Amino acid sequence: MSLKRVASGSTSRVLKQTRLLPSRIHRYYSTPTSSNAPEDSDVVIVGGGPAGLALASALGSSDAVKQNLKITLVEFGDLEKVRGWNMPSDAFSNRVSSLTNVSQNFLEEIGAWDLVDEGRTCGLEEMKVWDGISDARIDFNAATLGLGSSMTAGNQMARLTENLNLQRGLLRHLDQHTNVSLLDNTKVDSIHHDGNDADGWPAVHLSNGKVLRARLLVGADGFNSPVRSYAGIESYGWNYPTHAIVATLQHAPRSLQPNTTAYQRFLPTGPIAFLPLSPTASSLVWSTRPALAAALKQTDPLVLVRMINAAFRLPEVSLRYLHDRILEASTAGAPLTPSEITDEIAWRERAHDIHEYSAYASASVDPVSVNIGIPPEGAELLPPLVENIQPGTVASFPLRFNHAEAYVGEGRGARTVLVGDAAHTIHPLAGQGLNLGLGDAECLARCITGAVQRGGDIGSHTALLPYARERYFENHKMMSAVDKLHKLYASTAPPVVWARSVGVEVLNELDALKAGVMASAGAGPGPGRGDASWGMAASGVEALVGGARVVTAVRDGVRAVGVGALQQLAQSLAGRSR
Amino acid sequence: MHRLIAPTRILRPRVFSSARLHRHLHHDHGTSTVNAAEIAHFSRLSSLWWDEHGEFAMLHRMNPHRVDFVRAKLREVGLEEEGEGWAAARGARVLSGLDVLDVGCGGGILTESLTRLGARTLAVDASESNVAIASLHAAADPHLASSMADGALEYRHTSSEVLAQEAKRFDVVCSMEVIEHVDNPAAFLRSCAELVKPGGHLILSTISRTPLAYLTTILFAEDLLRLVAPGTHTYAKFINPSELVDFFHREGWIARVEPTRREAEVRGMVYLPWKGDWALVPRGFRSSVAETNYLFWVRKPATSL
């Protein structure tokens, strides 16, 4: 009996009782493609990175899902390495993310945060951001902005966490849930459409010979997502002419303040960020030209240390000079030695009248002595002087912007959904990539749970629609904000520098507006709080509009610099309520 | 807009007098209430039932909300009558193990959800091709195929009138978006009511016969926007909540014309174009806006009257 005949069947009278026997019908749908009998799994997650693990964890902790769905996570790498990851308490991995309070609340709700080693994380209480050319500053302080929530200890706008610490916690959490089976050291060889029409399911052929038929196939498989290719979803984007250098920095404890402040300086070549991890360790994310990144990666670590200290302190013109020197020496095959770079920096400091007791001095002073005792005036405006780089932690990677055209597959690519980097790759200048991925996982898990509770088919477009609707725009906003910021601060043209500086300085004077910028940050999932924050921001803007002088500032400054972009960025940095 | 609707006061004078209304609902002619032209119409559309972007997109999106309503009513009644212990033990699985009948199942959109939630479901439709499509679709899903194999899900080409002559009665009878398509709603309702076990639930969804409903469901959805195939709805067949209440009042299911929440409930359902989704109108029988699409729940008295 073909579909066609069925469709043209009798419609005249209600007499005969039609009852198709399941066994008879099933034959039409079976496919003789694989010698291995396909195994059905309700959710197949490809990729065991943070987003994939978080999704599996969230699904594993939901009662409705537990009773109804079988979940399989396939990972190419060895998850045992992540599970057994261990580092001395004074050493840190170089891949660190700033988890927003919303991300952290999500992890707490699913019960995974307890399994993350919190002693290795660091609550971020303050963020100091400034312009590399004009030095215009904006400070975000969790306490004065009224951030933080009952769920997180004290006032924090985010929590710096090693990615491996998070992944290990998620794996430990998954080990408690038996409805999720983990297949690691397993490669996805190919994905086929199992069936002749849109009703078919994706069949995932694995390197171990197994075939998994997925009611819902989740692509958490990164930038070059095979699931995205299978789904036929296009992705658009570009590479920034920028590489990011990461490293774990060692320094003396600060004498008058805890090491809980993040510093970010926007240089025309890209932002350099200092993210605190412990009293004596911090993480570096330095985005710069690929050639410079390569040269810096190859130099003596002490040269990199000097260059990092200088990058937060010296005027931009001198940094440009130093970068050229590094590149020249590197091309000539005679990289600068630590003493050469120290002399160069010391010379630039003298040229700029930076005396040895200034907070802005780095080469002419011994970092060990400077970090002890009463710090010089203005020391709190800058990160502590870095003394060493933890061996083996210097790495670099290219920066991309990429966004899939859709998150949910259709037609022959139906029953697929993308999360994390498979859906979007973002400039890491705000450390937002991981948060976007966790946000995806949270939303998709909520969506799947909702569909299960309503008896829906979790692979159907109807069930996945809320996910696409909620996340696509949300992620796009953040991605374009970060992209706009990158481009804005890459400019050295005086009008742009002036405009962005005025905007940032006006913004910095208005706590109400900043509270709005950080919005419901840290408030956790209370919608009311978010509204109130934006109300505050609105009244901040009103107050601002009150004076004629500032009206000009707003018109020419705030708007020109795209403070909107900064707002969205900062807002998500701090996390926001749904 | 939160508009109070007192069905007896506002809606009655519009189209029919009370007496005519009753005739409208109680006019029996013939044994089958199923309209031949309507069946032909849906047969043409059958193969499109499961295209979530096609003719039935609106129905696919409406379905989760219909299921929500069914679950909410069962839970509410269970909580009231069986207590917290029952609710805690049942959790979200309020439909589990219940005998449920889905009258006018179409492609099986609601049926599949009810079955996944653990109901022992019989789904019937007057269109043979609908039944075939629904069966094929369920068979392609391993979970539902096993339900079909062990008898927890069954599709039959029949009508409620024919079923009512059999002995089997159900804990829950659902008939969603059906009554506005039948020729003789009174006979249809009577057969559905007959199929409910004493103390069981009857849940309907349909469209009010109001100018607003005409505008949204026929003029916009069918004629202008083509979200729904033209010819799907006939204005004169739309039925107002007050008419349903009145019918079950006369049947003896509802003691007074204004039912208590234990007897019956009307919940409006609105499509929010900016969300691309439906939403249930916040609850409250008297204040529930049911100007267009609405859900109707009524409980059969535990003792026959």
Image (cartoon, coloured by chain):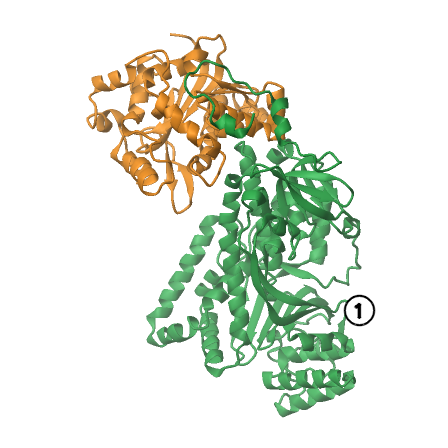
Q: Is residue A509 left or right of residue B221?
A: right
Residue that appears at 68% across and 72% down: A255
Residue visible at 60% across and 70% down?
A240
Percent position of residue A169, x then y: 71, 49
Between B2 and A542, the one lying in front of the other is: B2
| The C terminus of chain B - image quarter | top left
Badge 1 crowding class, 10 Å Cα cut-off, few under 14, some 14 to 19, many 20 or more, is few
Q: Amino acid at mark 1?
A: Pro
In the displayed structure, would residue A428 be above or below residue B16?
A: below
Taking the image as shown, residue B65 lies to the left or right of residue A38, namely left
Q: What count of labels does the image hold? A: 1
Q: Colour of chain A?
A: green
Residue B250 x, y percent position in the rendering: 30, 13
Residue under label 1: A391
Q: From where the camera sits, is residue B25 visible?
A: yes
Q: Colour of chain B?
A: orange
* Left/right of residue B229 with respect to residue B119 in the rendered view: left
Seen at 73% across and 45% down, the residue is A172
Image x and y of residue A465, in percent: 50, 44
- Chain bearing mark 1: A
Q: Residue at x 51, y 53 (%)?
A: A472
